[in-house]
C-alpha cells in the first residue's frame, strides 16, 4: 500500500475537484501531454506555471507511468509553493500536483521533501484558507508514508501542528491528521514528541464521532495503542471522559484491524499496572466484546483477548488443575465481581449463560475445537489455530 495500512490520500473525493481542461490538450497522446506539461511548468510565466501544474495534476491522478515521467517537474512545483503571495488557486494547483506525484511512488515522496516542500506545506497549516489546510494535511499524510521522510517531517516541527489540526481542523483534515500521526508514530523517537503535544483528548473526540468500522477509527486506535505504552498516555486516556469506553466500542464494533489495536491498547494498560487499570476497563463493559473476540478475532486478537480476560479476573494467579483456566472459569470469576443489574452486567451474564448452554450441549473440548477458543499454552488442552481474511 502507499503508506502504513491506509489508502492513498488522493482517494478522498475532495482532493480531486476537476477543473475545466482544454479539449485539445486532453486528447493529446500521453507522451506529448507530458512534454507539454513540463514545458509549461518550467516557464517564467506564473499563468503558464499554473496551467502546467493543473495538467500535471490531471495526468498523474491515475497514471503511475506519468508520475515517473513527470518527476522532473517536482522542483518547479515546489518553487511555486515558495511564493506565498501567489493566488490561492496557483498554490492549490501546485500542492495537488505534488500530492498526486507522491501517491504510490516512494522516489517522488523523497524527492519532494528533498526539494524543500516541507516548509511551505507546514506553513499552509496556519493558513486562513481551509482548502489549503486540508490539502496540506493530505500532502503530509502521503509524504509521511516514506520511512526516509518520517524523521525529516518531525524535525520540521510538523507534529504539534498536526495535533492542532486534529484539535480544530475540518472533519477531513482531522481524519488525515490522525492518519499522518499514525504514520509518524511508527518511528519510536516520534512518540515522545506526539505525547508532548497532548493529542489524546482530540483523538478520543474523533474516535467518539467517527464510524467505529472506519479507517479513521483504525488509525485512532493504532495511535492510542502506541501512546498507552507510556505512563503519560495511559493517564491521559483514563482521565479523558469516555476515553476507555471509546476504545471498548471499537473492540466491539470495529474492523478486524481496529479491534486488534483496541484490545492491544487495553492489554498494554492492564499489563502495565493491573491494580490501577483493571476496574476502569471492567467498568466500561469490556467482557462481551472480549468473549466475542476470542471466537471471531484474528489469531493475534484471540490471544490478546484471552490474556486480557485472565488479567481481568479477580485473581491474577493460575488456578489449580482442579479448576482449569478455561474461558468459562475466567468469565465466571469476573462476573462474580460485578454488582448490580445494569445493562453491561446483564449483557455479560447473558453471554456467559449462552456459553454455558453450548457447553451443556457439547463437550468443552469440542467447543474449543469448533469455536477456536484456545487456552494458554501452559494449559493441558491442545492449542488450535485459525485463519481469517486480512483487510
Image (tube, helix red, strand yellow):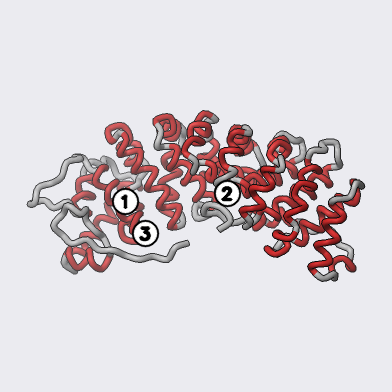
| Label 3 environment density (alpha carbons within 10 Å; few <14, some 14–19, many ≥20) | many
- Return the x and y of residue 248 as percentages of the image width and height: 40, 46
Left or right: 237 in relation to 98: left
Cα distance in 3D space between marks 2 and 1? 30 Å
Q: Earlier along the polypeptide chain: callout 2 or callout 3?
A: 2
Mark yes or no: residue 375 visible: yes
211, above or below 270, in the image? below
Decide which of 172, 116 is in the foreground and name it: 116
In front: 306, or 37? 37
List x then y, in percent, for residue 6: 55, 54
Disc 2 and disc 3: Cα gap in Å? 25 Å
Q: Nearer the viewer, residue 345 or 28?
A: 28
> In the rendered image, which residue does mark 2 sit on?
145
Q: Which mark is residue 256?
A: none
Q: Is residue 347 visible?
A: no
Q: Secondary structure at mark 1?
A: helix
At label 2, counting other C-alpha atoms closer than 10 Å, the crowd grade (few under 14, some 14-19, many 20 or more) is many
Q: Position of residue 217 (x, y in %)?
A: 51, 49
Of the numbered discs 3 and 1, the one sitting upstream in the chain is 3
Please give the residue where the numbered disc 1 appears in the rendered image: 305
Q: Nearer the viewer, mark 3 or mark 1?
A: 3
Mark 3 lies on a secondary structure that is: loop
The answer to which image quadrant residue 373 occupies is: bottom left
Given contact means CB atoms under 8 Å apart, are the residues at marks 3 and 1 in contact? no
Specify which label sits upstream in the sequence, 2 or 1: 2
Q: Are marks 2 and 3 in contact (CB under 8 Å)?
A: no
Q: Position of residue 56 (x, y in %)?
A: 78, 57
Q: Please, is residue 123 above or below residue 21 in the view?
A: above
Q: Which mark is residue 298?
A: 3
> Spatial distance from mark 3 to mark 1, Cα to Cα?
10 Å
Amino acid at each position: 500500500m502507499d503508506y502504513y495500512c491506509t489508502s492513498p490520500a488522493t482517494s478522498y473525493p475532495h482532493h480531486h475537484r476537476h477543473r475545466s481542461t482544454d479539449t485539445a490538450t486532453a486528447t493529446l497522446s500521453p507522451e506529448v501531454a507530458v512534454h507539454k506539461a513540463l514545458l509549461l511548468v518550467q516557464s517564467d510565466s506564473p499563468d503558464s506555471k499554473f496551467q502546467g501544474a493543473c495538467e500535471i495534476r490531471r495526468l498523474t491522478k491515475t497514471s503511475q507511468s506519468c508520475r515517473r515521467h513527470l518527476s522532473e517537474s517536482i522542483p518547479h512545483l515546489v518553487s511555486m509553493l515558495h511564493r506565498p503571495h501567489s493566488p490561492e488557486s496557483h498554490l492549490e494547483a501546485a500542492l495537488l500536483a505534488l500530492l498526486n506525484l507522491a501517491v504510490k511512488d516512494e522516489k517522488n515522496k523523497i524527492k519532494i521533501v528533498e526539494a524543500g516542500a516541507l516548509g511551505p506545506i507546514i506553513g499552509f497549516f496556519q493558513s486562513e484558507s481551509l482548502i489549503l489546510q486540508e490539502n496540506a494535511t493530505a500532502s503530509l499524510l502521503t509524504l509521511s508514508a516514506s520511512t526516509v521522510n518520517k524523521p525529516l517531517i518531525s524535525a520540521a516541527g510538523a507534529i504539534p501542528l498536526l495535533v492542532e489540526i486534529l484539535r480544530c481542523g475540518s472533519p477531513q483534515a482531522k481524519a488525515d491528521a490522525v492518519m499522518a500521526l499514525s504514520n509518524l508514530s511508527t518511528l519510536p523517537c516520534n512518540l515522545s514528541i506526539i505525547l508532548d503535544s497532548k493529542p489524546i483528548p482530540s483523538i478520543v473526540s474523533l474516535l467518539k464521532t467517527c464510524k467505529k468500522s472506519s479507517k479513521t477509527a483504525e488509525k485512532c486506535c493504532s495511535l492510542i495503542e502506541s501512546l498507552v505504552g507510556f505512563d503519560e498516555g495511559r493517564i491521559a486516556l483514563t482521565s479523558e471522559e469516555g476515553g476507555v469506553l471509546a476504545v471498548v466500542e471499537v473492540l466491539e464494533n470495529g474492523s478486524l484491524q481496529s479491534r486488534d489495536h483496541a484490545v492491544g491498547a487495553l492489554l498494554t494498560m492492564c499489563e502495565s499496572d493491573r491494580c490501577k487499570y483493571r476496574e476502569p476497563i471492567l467498568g466500561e463493559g469490556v467482557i462481551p466484546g472480549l468473549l466475542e473476540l476470542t471466537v471471531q478475532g484474528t489469531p493475534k486478537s484471540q490471544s490478546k483477548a484471552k490474556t486480557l480476560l485472565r488479567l481481568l479476573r479477580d485473581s491474577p494467579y493460575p488456578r489449580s488443575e482442579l479448576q482449569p483456566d478455561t474461558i468459562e472459569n475466567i468469565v465466571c470469576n469476573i462476573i462474580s465481581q460485578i454488582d448490580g443489574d445494569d445493562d453491561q452486567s446483564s449483557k455479560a451474564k447473558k453471554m456467559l449463560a449462552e456459553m454455558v448452554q453450548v457447553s451443556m450441549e457439547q463437550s468443552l473440548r469440542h467447543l474449543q475445537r469448533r469455536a477456536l477458543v484456545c487456552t494458554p499454552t501452559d494449559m493441558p488442552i491442545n492449542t488450535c489455530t485459525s485463519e481469517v481474511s486480512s483487510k
